[in-house]
Image (cartoon, rainbow, N blue to C red):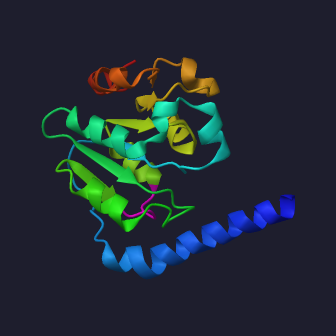
């Protein structure tokens, strides 16, 4: 059973990379990071076991979260979203185009270094993971969806337990910055 699960996972990752290399990369025009104020949201694996089991049910609909977040950012601020570099192609061309159609969203190419985006962003919004940890180490405000990470007790980490709290939590994180 384990061998077949590993094989299925490897096949899925290879398929995603094939889709990215031969379709998405050629048919989708990624945005470039510009000299502007932005909040960074790395996209997370949608069907990862930990994601499905350990987090709020509402945090699984990334498109709705991104759309809601983008609509409540301060005027002139952008939302940068980026696929995980370990699994490019896991999001459909249609999904990426729908994101890009929202005026204040920039869809960044998956192989742009997340650390460079984190250094320049006002805050990061993430489920959890490496990007949250890197932002914490760089003293950037981190907005997490009910994080259980060991660093989540810091004043730099803002937890969102309810989807209605997302706009005000992100605003507070941007407003406070890394002063805390």
- Quadrant where the C terminus sits is top left
Q: Residue at x 50, y 56 (%)?
A: 84
Location of residue 123 in the rendering, given as x and y in whole percent from the top left corner:
36, 34
Residue 122 falls left or right of residue 50: left
- Is residue 38 rendered magenta in the image? no
Give the tally of numbered discs.
0
Location of residue 71 in the rendering, given as x and y in whole percent from the top left corner:
21, 36
- Is residue 109 rendered magenta in the image? yes
- Quadrant where the N terminus sits is bottom right
Q: Say which quarter of the image contains residue 130.
A: top right
Q: Is residue 7 above or below residue 170?
A: below
Q: Is residue 97 above or below residue 169?
A: below
- Residue lying furthest left: 75
Residue 13 falls left or right of residue 164: right
Location of residue 120 in the rendering, given as x and y in whole percent from the top left corner:
33, 45
Residue 51 falls left or right of residue 69: right
Location of residue 127 in the rendering, given as x and y in whole percent from the top left corner:
51, 37
Q: Is residue 138 visible?
A: no
Q: Is residue 152 above or below residue 85?
A: above
Magenta span dominant secondary structure: loop
Magenta region: which residues? 108-113
Q: Residue at x 59, y 40 (%)?
A: 51
Q: Say which quarter of the image contains residue 16.
A: bottom right
Q: Residue at x 25, y 50 (%)?
A: 105
Q: Is residue 55 visible?
A: yes
Q: Residue at x 23, y 56 (%)?
A: 34
Q: Is residue 7 above or below residue 37?
A: below
């Amino acid at each position: 059973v384990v061998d077949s699960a590993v094989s299925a996972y490897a096949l899925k990752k290879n398929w995603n990379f094939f889709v990215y290399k031969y379709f998405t990369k050629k048919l989708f025009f990624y945005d470039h990071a510009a000299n502007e104020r932005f909040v960074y949201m790395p996209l997370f694996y949608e069907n990862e076991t930990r994601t499905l089991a350990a987090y709020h049910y509402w945090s699984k609909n990334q498109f709705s979260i991104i759309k809601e977040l983008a609509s409540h950012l301060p005027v002139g601020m952008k939302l940068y979203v980026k696929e995980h570099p370990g699994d490019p192609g896991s999001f459909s061309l249609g999904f990426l185009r729908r994101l890009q159609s929202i005026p204040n969203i920039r869809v960044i190419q998956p192989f742009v270094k997340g650390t460079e985006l984190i250094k320049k962003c006002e805050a990061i919004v993430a489920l959890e993971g490496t990007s949250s940890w890197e932002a914490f180490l760089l003293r950037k405000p981190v907005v997490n969806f009910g994080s259980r990470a060991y660093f989540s007790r810091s004043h730099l980490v803002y937890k969102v337990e309810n989807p209605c709290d997302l706009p005000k939590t992100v605003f507070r994180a941007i407003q406070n910055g890394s002063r805390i």
